[in-house]
Amino acid sequence: MSQVEESIEVGVPVHTAYNQWTQFETFPEFMSGVERIEQRSDTLTHWVTKVDGVSKEFDAEITEQIPDERVAWTTVGGEAKQAGAVTFHHLDESRTKVMLQMEFQPEGLAETVGDKLGFVKRQTKGDLERFKKYIESRGLETGGWRGTVV
């Protein structure tokens, strides 16, 4: 398994950053390679991705969700093997640190080489930078799910 950790400070309150992150169907607007996400239940999402011409579909299950603090997931079935968590850290009334930690299993030669060359780390960093621009330009979340999963 490979691991990646990235973080970014965003200029919105913690509840705004957290609420937007729970709107999984908006991820294609700021995550490269994510073509579509369908929210199938409170804890199950279906992902369609395409990276460097390689398409994958998989389900991800929310394994832990604590409002304004943490969302953790793991893939179930499908072609991708990964697990991770995003945490939200209150810096002050208008700033939040968003930290993403993920473990994943590269599949095949291209993914293994890409991982070794730092592709996933750069993509994750870019996704967080696009999330920052997305949420700061809006100033408000598009919605939010405040339920708890433990």
Image: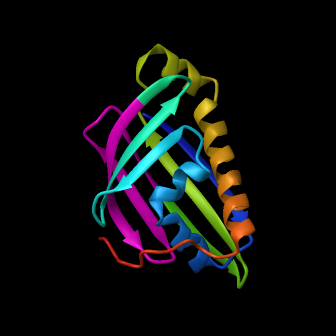
Q: How is the image coloured?
A: rainbow
| Residue 18, magenta (yes or no) | no
**Residue at the extreme left of the image, as rendered:** 77
Residue at horizontal 46%, vertical 59%? 24
Point out residue 128 in the picture as x, y percentages from the top left corner. 65, 53
Please state, as top left, top right, bottom left or bottom right, where the N terminus lies in the image.
top left
Point out residue 101 in the picture as x, y percentages from the top left corner. 52, 51
Which residues are drawn in magenta? Answer: 56-85
Count of residue discs = 0
Residue at horizontal 60%, vertical 41%? 32
Query: Quadrant of the rendered structure where residue 13 is?
Result: bottom right
116 vs 25, left or right, is right
Residue at horizontal 28%, vertical 36%? 78
Up/down of 29 relative to 34, above or below = below
| Residue 57, magenta (yes or no) | yes
Up/down of 123 relative to 26, above or below = above
Foreground residue among 71 and 130: 130
Up/down of 45 relative to 115, above or below = below
72 vs 4, left or right, is left
Magenta segment's dominant SS is strand
Foreground residue among 25 and 43: 25
Please state, as top left, top right, bottom left or bottom right, where the C terminus lies in the image.
bottom left
Point out residue 62 in the picture as x, y percentages from the top left corner. 34, 60
**Residue at the extreme bottom of the image, as rendered:** 93
Query: Quadrant of the rendered structure where residue 76 is?
Result: top left
Point out residue 136 in the picture as x, y percentages from the top left corner. 73, 68
